[in-house]
């Protein structure tokens, strides 16, 4: 049984639960999560502006 995997990014104005609902509509189930800070240079200093969140989903090809 081979599974398809795909990363879904939680958009800036989207909740994690809304992203999970979007994944479920496409037939994916959450199996992982990763986060990393997004920086911008303000006055020559790297400043964190938001947290980038991605959810990993798997889907059975036979389903």
Image (tube, helix red, strand yellow):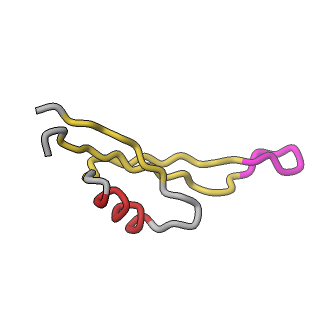
Residue 44 lies in the magenta-colored region: yes
> Main SS type for the magenta part?
strand
Q: Nearer the viewer, residue 2 or 53?
A: 2
- At 35% from the left and 45% from the top, the residue drawn is 56
Q: Is residue 47 left or right of residue 12?
A: right
**What is the span of residues highlighted in magenta in the rendered image?**
40-47
Q: Residue 9 location, x and y as percent?
A: 48, 51
- At 76% from the left and 45% from the top, the residue drawn is 46
- At 26% from the left and 48% from the top, the residue drawn is 31
What quarter of the picture does the N terminus occupy?
Answer: top left
Q: Residue 23 location, x and y as percent?
A: 34, 56
16 vs 1: above or below: below
Q: Residue 7 location, x and y as percent?
A: 40, 43
- At 23% from the left and 44% from the top, the residue drawn is 59
Q: Is residue 59 left or right of residue 55?
A: left
Q: Residue 19 location, x and y as percent?
A: 41, 61
Q: Nearer the viewer, residue 15 or 44?
A: 15
State the residue lying farthest toward the front. 62
């Amino acid at each position: 049984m081979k599974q398809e995997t795909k990363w879904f990014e939680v958009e800036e104005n989207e909740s994690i639960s809304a992203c999970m609902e979007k994944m479920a509509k496409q037939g994916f189930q959450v199996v992982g999560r990763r986060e990393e800070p997004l920086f911008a240079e303000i006055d020559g200093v790297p400043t964190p502006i938001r947290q980038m969140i991605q959810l990993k989903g798997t889907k059975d090809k036979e389903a």
